[in-house]
Amino acid sequence: QVRIYLAAPWDHREDAAVFGAMLEQGGHKLTEKWWHHRDVGAYPHEAHGRDLEELVNQAWRDYAGVLTAERLVVMQLAKSEGKAVETGIALRERIPICVYSPKGLYGSIFHYLPEIKKVHTFEEVLAWLRK
């Protein structure tokens, strides 16, 4: 069982939930299921009061989810600042990273680093997790 943080664009959170469930069915543990976060109406604009508290709480939970993961799996389905930050945290902490990109697209210059595994299928993600 590997502890995984699954990063994906917020707009693809339903895809992440399905992918995450498949990882769990494979015997792995997800460190933070961020797709269950409440959709905060203020985002991406300035937030106040409860909206601000909620966004801060979500950010810290995601941060902790990356730090407690043994591996980071990035779903490269669209540009996303959140998953770029999560990738940066994992790089800094030397957490192994796998970028799942069914269309073969790279999300940032950092995806070209040789330390980052690039795959195109779910089966390849599972094989990487077994290593």
Image (spheres, rainbow, N blue to C red):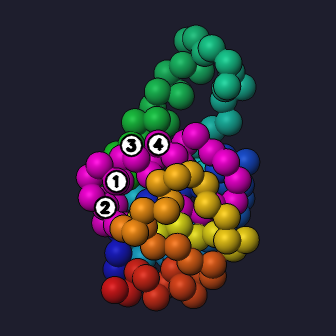
Q: Nearer the viewer, mark 3 or mark 1?
A: 1
Residue 63 numbered mark, or none: 3
User: Badges 2 and 1: C-beta atoms under 8 Å apart?
Assistant: yes
Give the residue pinned by disc 1: 91
Q: Nearer the viewer, mark 2 or mark 1?
A: 1
| Mark with earlier residue (4, 3) | 3
Disc 1 marks which amino acid? Leu
Q: Give the magenta-colored segment's residue range.
A: 68-96
Report x, y in % for residue 57: 45, 31
Q: Which mark is in front, 3 or 2?
A: 2
Q: Which residue is mark 2?
A: 95
Badge 1: few (under 14), some or many (20 or more) residues near its Cα, within 10 Å?
Answer: some
Q: Amino acid at mark 4?
A: Val
Q: Is residue 50 visible?
A: no
Q: Residue at x 34, y 86 (%)?
A: 131
Give the Cα separation between the discs numbered 4 and 1. 10 Å
Q: Nearer the viewer, residue 111 or 20?
A: 111
Q: For residue 65: magenta?
A: no
